[in-house]
Image (cartoon, rainbow, N blue to C red):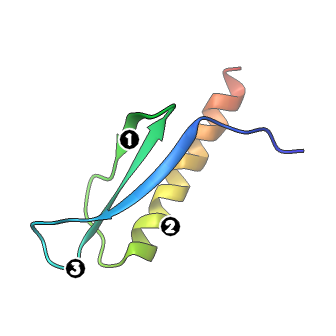
């Protein structure tokens, strides 16, 4: 059974740039990471965020 982790992803449209998206990762509700750049689609942003989150989850599991 997979263990839960404290990370969540949010992908949002950038309000001042047309049709661009950014992601953020929160740990226990607090901002942990933000995308260093913007993405053309929500899907691209989510895919990149999932890669970063997987690294965070791995580190979190090792540190327990």
C-alpha distance separating marks 2 and 1: 15 Å
Find residue 24 and report its horizontal and vertical position in percent: 37, 49
Find residue 17 and report its horizontal and vertical position in percent: 12, 71
Q: Which residue occupies the extreme left position in the image? A: 16
Label 3: element kind: loop
Kindly identify which residue carries mark 2. Answer: 47
Mark 3 or 1, closer to the camera: 3
Q: Which residue occupies the extreme front position in the image? A: 29
Mark 2 or 3, closer to the camera: 3
Left-right relation of 13 to 2: left
Find residue 49 and report its horizontal and vertical position in percent: 46, 57
In which quadrant is the C terminus drawn? top right
**Dot 3 alpha-carbon crowd within 10 angstroms: few under 14, some 14 to 19, many 20 or more:** few
Above or below residue 53? Residue 14 is below
Residue at position x 63%, y 39% from top?
Answer: 57
C-alpha distance separating marks 2 and 3: 17 Å
In which quadrant is the N terminus drawn? top right
Which numbered disc, 2 or 1, marks the residue that appears first in the sequence?
1
Tally of numbered discs: 3
Label 2: element kind: helix
Residue at position x 54%, y 56% from top?
Answer: 51
Label 1: element kind: strand
Kindly identify which residue carries mark 3. Answer: 19
Residue at position x 9%, y 66% from top?
Answer: 16
In the figure, residue 22 lies in which quadrant? bottom left
Above or below residue 36? Residue 38 is below
Kindly identify which residue carries mark 1. Answer: 33
Residue at position x 63%, y 30% from top?
Answer: 60
Find residue 46 and report its horizontal and vertical position in percent: 47, 65
Above or below residue 13? Residue 51 is above
Left-right relation of 4 to 25: right
């Amino acid at each position: 059974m997979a263990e839960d982790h404290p990370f969540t992803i949010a992908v949002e449209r950038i309000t001042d740039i047309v049709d661009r998206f950014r992601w953020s990762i929160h740990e226990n509700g607090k901002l942990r990471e933000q995308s260093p750049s913007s993405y053309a689609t929500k899907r691209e942003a989510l895919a990149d965020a999932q890669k970063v989150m997987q690294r965070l989850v791995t580190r979190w599991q090792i540190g327990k």
